Amino acid sequence: MPYLSVIVAHEHHWVKYNYGDWITLQPESGGSINSVRNGMLLWRDLHIHFDDYMVSISPDDNYKIVCFMYDANNIAGTHLDKTFVEDPSHP
């Protein structure tokens, strides 16, 4: 799980900026950074673009998807499904 190691490597930012305060479903171990609420399941190519900061999700704009590249999948401007945003048991 190379992506998980990247997240844990930046855990000091998580703590410094109190991102754990946003987590409503605490994990059984490992601190709030390991909460299911701090995860996303992405297509492989979209995951790469997300890691490269070419795709983002704006929580301040109703979880709108923002693309900083050519959008072959036509996802720019769409929003995450509210079912997943409002249910604390989903990533």
Image: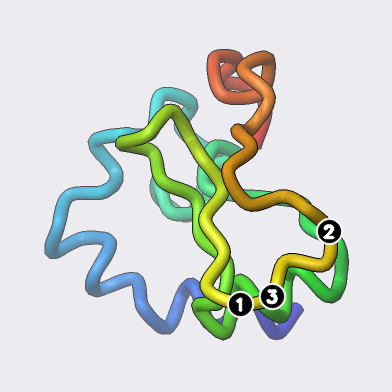
Q: Which image quadrant is residue 1 in?
A: bottom right
Instruction: Give above or below for 29 relative to 3.
Output: above
Amino acid found under the numbered disc labelled 1: Met
Q: Are marks 1 and 2 in contact (CB under 8 Å)?
A: no
Amino acid found under the numbered disc labelled 3: Tyr
Q: Identify residue for label 2.
A: 73
- Residue occupying the point 61% across, 17% down: 82
On-image quarter of the C terminus:
top right
| Residue 26 point in image, percent of width and height | 46, 32
Q: Which image quadrant is residue 10 in?
A: bottom left
Q: Are marks 1 and 3 in contact (CB under 8 Å)?
A: yes
Q: Which mark is residue 22?
A: none
How packed mark 3 is, by other alpha carbons closer than 10 Å (few <14, some 14-19, many 20 or more), is few
As measured in the structure, the alpha-carbon distance from the residue carrying label 2 to the one carrying label 3 is 9 Å
As measured in the structure, the alpha-carbon distance from the residue carrying label 1 to the one carrying label 3 is 4 Å
| Residue 63 point in image, percent of width and height | 48, 35
Query: 13 and 70: which one is in front?
Result: 70
Amino acid found under the numbered disc labelled 2: Asn
Query: 13 and 26: which one is in front?
Result: 13
Q: Identify residue for label 3.
A: 70
Q: Is residue 64 left or right of residue 42?
A: left
Q: Identify residue for label 1.
A: 69
How packed mark 1 is, by other alpha carbons closer than 10 Å (few <14, some 14-19, many 20 or more), is few
| Residue 18 point in image, percent of width and height | 17, 49
Instruction: Assign a secondary structure to mark 2.
Output: loop
- Residue occupying the point 60% across, 15% down: 87
